[in-house]
Amino acid sequence: MAAAAEAQAAPGDQGSVRADVWIWSVRLTKTRSQAASACRAGHVRVNGERVKPAYLIKPGDEIRLRHAERERVVVLTRVIRKRVGAPVAVQCYVDNSPPPPPREFAGPVAVRDRGAGRPTKRERRVLEELHKRRFGSTDG
């Protein structure tokens, strides 16, 4: 099984592949549709320019992906077209991503006493403000 995965990521297979397929193949996103959606939303940049899902990428391209509140910066080293295991996928790119923010950096959490009833208008606004600070604005 591992030999088949290695064959899919063979270095002799130097060509080009769709951006959404490669992002999904190396496990930067869970599904191919998530990768395609990220491309359509402008969250994927190849060599500094926004790309569509069908954009062809090749070895040496720098891919920037904004996904799950984190920016990933990778340089493509191997072209693969099929999803492979994590150990093989890591060999297909060089990860230049900044480290993720520490988990304890999370902001204050809004907690209400059980049985306190519905929040007043003022309390609701305070809760919404805390939520915006922690998770960013949800308004368009």
Image: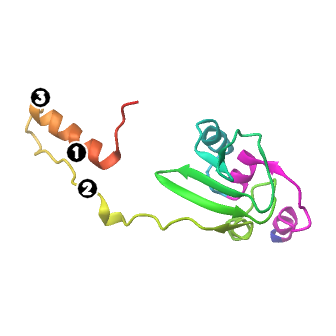
For disc 2, the marked residue is 107
Give the residue drawn at x 92%, y 67%: 12
- In magenta segment, residue 18: yes
Which of marks 2 and 3 precedes in the sequence? 2
For disc 3, the marked residue is 121
Q: CA distance from mark 1 to mark 3?
A: 14 Å
Model colouring: rainbow
Q: CA distance from mark 3 to mark 2?
A: 22 Å
Boundaries of the magenta span: 3-26
For disc 1, the marked residue is 130
Q: Residue 63: x percent and y percent?
A: 66, 55
Mark 3: few, some, or many residues within 10 Å (few <14, many ≥20)? few
Give the residue drawn at x 11%, y 36%: 123
Tell me: residue 108, above or below residue 53.
Answer: below
Mark 2: few, some, or many residues within 10 Å (few <14, many ≥20)? few
Give the residue drawn at x 36%, y 31%: 139
Badge 2 amino acid: Gly
Q: Residue 131: x percent and y percent?
A: 27, 43
Going by the image, does 82 lie left or right of 69?
right
Give the residue drawn at x 34%, y 39%: 137
Q: CA distance from mark 2 to mark 1?
A: 8 Å
Q: Quarter holding the C terminus?
A: top left
